[in-house]
Amino acid sequence: MSFCKVSKASIYYEIIGTGTPIVMLHGYSPDHRLMKGCMEPVFAEREGWKRIYIDLPGMGKTTDYEKINNSDEMLEAVVELIHSLLPNERYLLVGESYGGYLVRGILREYHEQVLGAGFICPLIIPNKQSRTVPVQSIVAVDKEFLSTLTKEELEDFSSHLVVLDDYNCHRYTNEVLAGQRNADVEFLEKIQGSYRFSFPVDEISFDKPCLFLLGKQDSMVGYKDAFAILDKFPRAAFTILDKAGHNLQIEQATLFTSLMSEWLERVEEFNN
């Protein structure tokens, strides 16, 4: 196992492949398996990319994070890791949910080093009560599969997925729920007390290729709030997918892989 010691944490990470670095930042409470599960298929037939998957403090295998008290310090830990693993290198960022919020924090100060950014169901507004979100809904079900679930499983899947079938529930269990079971709930509740950065984000215009993937049925962070920052990303593809909630990367796996691949092609073209 590989760990990177930074000022306020010992961050677990995995590196797959060689080439242009891409730092993957998962959301709040899962671990690196969320990003690994959806991003590795993108590189099944694509070489030249070094994927760096990390466990954010309080999640996964990362340790010694108790002195982190807010999102500012969470961001500092991630930036320290990037600078330690990729000294004087340029890189891409992909962030899911809270990871997307951290990406915006990184771009604020280090946009010159970043070659492009991908956002998966990104957290736009930290304050949950201030978000514009649709009501949680189910848009498609496999009734035969549902009959095999326990009451607890059905309640959990119905709260987090909008397409209920064997494939989606299996991936959700292995890529999302498995990480959440290891999360430090007390620590994460502490961070949520200072969830918003102390500084404004999205002040700069980031003109390199980007991708926003948003779920039409995402009841966690929604999709409408992202429109407010779209003008700050003039080279962003902005895609709202139907039959997709906050686990869009699972529920629309084929489109996800295709759109991510197209984004990487734009990055390559832009930087050649």
Image (cartoon, helix red, strand yellow):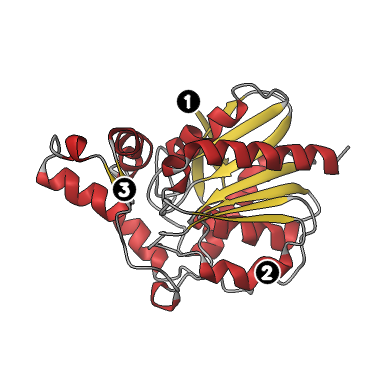
Q: Which residue is mark 3?
A: 140
Residue 54, horizontal then vertical, whole percent: 52, 39
Q: Residues within 10 Å of mark 2 (few under 14, many from 20)?
A: some
Q: Secondary structure at mark 2?
A: loop
Q: Earlier in the sequence, mark 2 or mark 3?
A: 3
Q: Which residue is mark 1?
A: 1
Label 3, label 1: how many angstroms apart (C-alpha)? 40 Å
Identity of the residue drawn at 40% across and 49% down:
58
Q: Residues within 10 Å of mark 3 (few under 14, many from 20)?
A: few
Label 2, label 3: how many angstroms apart (C-alpha)? 36 Å
Q: Can residue 201 be seen at all in this image of the molecule?
A: no
Q: Is residue 201 above or below residue 106?
A: below
Contact (CB < 8 A) between labels 3 and 1?
no
Inspect the image, locate mark 3, and give the three-letter code of the amino acid beneath it.
Answer: Ala
Identify the residue at the far right of this view. 272
Q: Is residue 205 above or below residue 243?
A: below
Q: Residues within 10 Å of mark 1 (few under 14, many from 20)?
A: few
The one of 12 and 248 positioned closer to us in this rendering: 248
> Which of the 4 quarters of the picture holds residue 226?
bottom right
Q: Nearer the viewer, mark 2 or mark 3?
A: 3
Identity of the residue drawn at 75% across and 37% down:
265
Q: Which residue is mark 2?
A: 202
Inspect the image, locate mark 1, and give the three-letter code of the amino acid beneath it.
Answer: Met
Q: Taking 269 as reference, is 40 left or right? A: left
Q: Taking 122 as reference, is 238 left or right? A: right
Inspect the image, locate mark 2, and give the three-letter code of the amino acid beneath it.
Answer: Asp
Residue 153, horizontal then vertical, whole percent: 18, 43
Q: Taking 109 as reference, is 249 left or right? A: left
Q: Earlier in the sequence, mark 3 or mark 1?
A: 1
Q: Is residue 1 above or below residue 267?
A: above
